[in-house]
Amino acid sequence: MGNEVEFRLAIERDLERIVEMLADDKLGATREQFELPLPEVYREAFRAIEADPNNELVVAYLGNKVIGVQQITFTPHLTRQGGWRATIEGVRTCSSVRGKGIGTALIKWVIQRAKDRGCLLTQLTTDKERKDAIRFYERLGFQASHEGMKLTLR
Amino acid sequence: MGNEVEFRLAIERDLERIVEMLADDKLGATREQFELPLPEVYREAFRAIEADPNNELVVAYLGNKVIGVQQITFTPHLTRQGGWRATIEGVRTCSSVRGKGIGTALIKWVIQRAKDRGCLLTQLTTDKERKDAIRFYERLGFQASHEGMKLTLR
């Protein structure tokens, strides 16, 4: 087919493409360091994610081109009468395909994945500067009910 | 000594006391179900947390009385040039000791724990209704830079 978006777990060969997408973004450009060879810190983080059954790095692809990425973390909690949550982080789609519903497909995929794993909640934090992202998630049913608070340690 | 707060990983014998604290709270009262025997869902969640090396349920105690609890989740991420984050969830202190700095001691403890594990960031979400909690975290250096977005799945 080649013209329908599909999803799979990322493999290490996808990593350069993934970091390129993470850096191709207004905030990502200031936070990431995309250069070849890739800084070793990205490979270390990739291997830690890959080794953890409660973390999944998922890519979206069209034909053989990776065009989107997101990380899902599954966490057991006591709160809300015990249960698992799925937390989404590092969602990016390739700038050349933005506006084509790839982001929506990514998030709908993760919601289904979270249901399949029996999660009671899907959650994420998004920078308050990302007004479009906030509206995008609200359209998909998320509520901005919480403050997302961060403390940088180094 | 007995009059200085100390911290340790929770054991299953602490669980009734922990759920009692989770429920003793304006929002927690509507979300939790504290009754004896404890609903099995809490025991299942406790065992899942205990089995995961990237999750730690920590209690604060004075003498032999548990007076505070919080969960820390350590997660590897590609974003921000790769690295680990510590996410805090389910922070409660016993109502009889509120205002005595136990909450501050809990959060300072987790910040140190996150540094010891090499995390680059400590993060949490807190319900926007919890105005006092938001100010409390801001005094400890957290910034409400993000929207915390949730989607309930069942």
Image (cartoon, coloured by chain):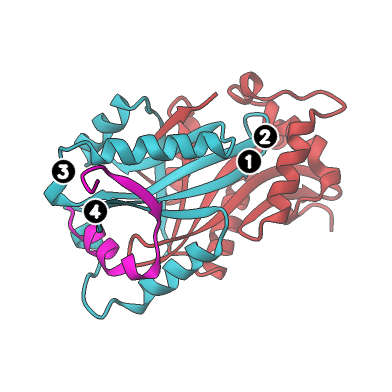
Chain colours: A cyan, B red
The verdict on residue B127 being magenta is: no
What's the amino acid at mark 4?
Gly
Location of residue A34 with respect to B54 vertically, above or below: below
Position of residue B116 measured from the top left corner of the image (x, y, whole percent):
56, 69
**Quick one: SS at disc 1?**
strand
The answer to which of marks 2 and 1 sits earlier in the sequence is: 1
Q: Residue at x 31, y 77 (%)?
A: A39
The answer to which of marks 1 and 3 sits earlier in the sequence is: 1
Position of residue A80 measured from the top left corner of the image (x, y, whole percent):
62, 29
The span from disc 1 to disc 3 (Cα, nearest Å) is 35 Å
What's the amino acid at mark 1?
His
- Do badges 2 and 4 share one subunit? yes
The circle on residue A82 is 2
The circle on residue A77 is 1
What's the amino acid at mark 3?
Arg
Nearer to us in this view, A55 or B137? A55
Question: Which residue has dot 3 on it?
Answer: A98
Nearer the observer: mark 3 or 4; the answer is: 4
Question: Which residue has dot 4 on it?
Answer: A63
Residue B147 visible in the shown view? no
* CB contact under 8 Å: marks 1 and 3: no
The answer to which of marks 2 and 4 sits earlier in the sequence is: 4
The verdict on residue A11 being magenta is: yes
The magenta segment: A1-25
The answer to which of marks 3 and 4 sits earlier in the sequence is: 4
Q: Chain of mark 3?
A: A
Q: Residue at x 24, y 41 (%)?
A: A102
Position of residue B47 measured from the top left corner of the image (x, y, whole percent):
75, 47
Nearer the observer: mark 1 or 3; the answer is: 3
Nearer the observer: mark 2 or 4; the answer is: 4
What's the amino acid at mark 2?
Gly
* CB contact under 8 Å: marks 2 and 1: yes
